[in-house]
Amino acid sequence: MGRALLGTESDAIIHADRAGIIRFWNPGAERVFGFTAAEALGRTLDIIIPEPQRARHWAGFRQVMETGESRYGRGDLLAVPGLRKDGSRVSLEFTIVPVHAANGGMEGMIAVLRDVTGRFEATRALRRELAALKARG
């Protein structure tokens, strides 16, 4: 059953080590981001993080590595933009699973990400339409 989950194409599942180096990249990550596993493995998460979000991402990542704590590991969803291989953006929702060593220290994180671009764009269009209706009064 675990192999079926890790091999899914519906959700991206990515494992990054303590330094933010990609160590696992499933078929869903290939579909969402456009990088093959061979292209992604051994590279940093920067390949999928848009430049404007990188500083904030790495500050949060380092904090989780130091403390072992994140609200996104308890089921809260994080909504962020992502970057595809072709340079286009993708809207993502995800949760993380902290990976602990035998001594309790942090070894890295596993992220389960879902592409919600279609829903995000539909919501944005509805908000624009509502604002236009309100403006007409």
Image (cartoon, helix red, strand yellow):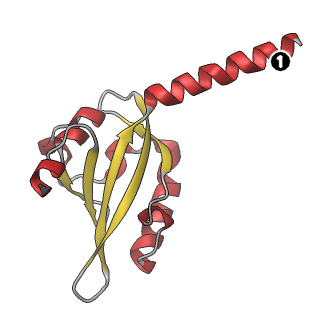
Q: Quadrant of the N terminus?
A: bottom left
- Name which residue lies at 44% across and 66% down: 74
Residue 134, given in percent of the width and then of the height, sits at 83, 18
* Res 18 visible: no
Quick check: 120 above or below 15? above
In screen coordinates, is 99 left or right of 68?
Answer: left
Residue type pointed to by label 1: Lys
Looking at the image, is 75 positioned above or below residue 32?
below
Give the total number of marks visible in the rendering.
1
Residue at position x 49%, y 28% from top? 119
**Residue 137 visible in the snapshot:** yes
Most extreme residue toward the right, as rendered?
137
Residue 74 vertical position relative to residue 113 in the rendered view, above or below: below
- Residue pushed farthest top? 136
Which picture quadrant has residue 87? top left
Residue in the picture at 79% in, 13% down: 133
Question: Which one is in front, 62 or 68?
Answer: 68
Residue named by callout 1: 134
Task: Indicate the position of residue 108 as horizontal and vertical percent values.
Answer: 29, 68
Where is residue 59 shown, x and y percent of the image? 50, 64
At x 46%, y 61%, the residue is 72
* 77 relative to 68, above or below: above
Q: Quadrant of the image for the C terminus?
A: top right
Q: Residue furthest front?
A: 1
Q: In this view of the protein, which residue sits in the foreground, 6 or 14?
A: 6
| Image side of residue 137 versus residue 128, left or right | right
Specify the quadrant of the image occupied by residue 96.
Answer: bottom left
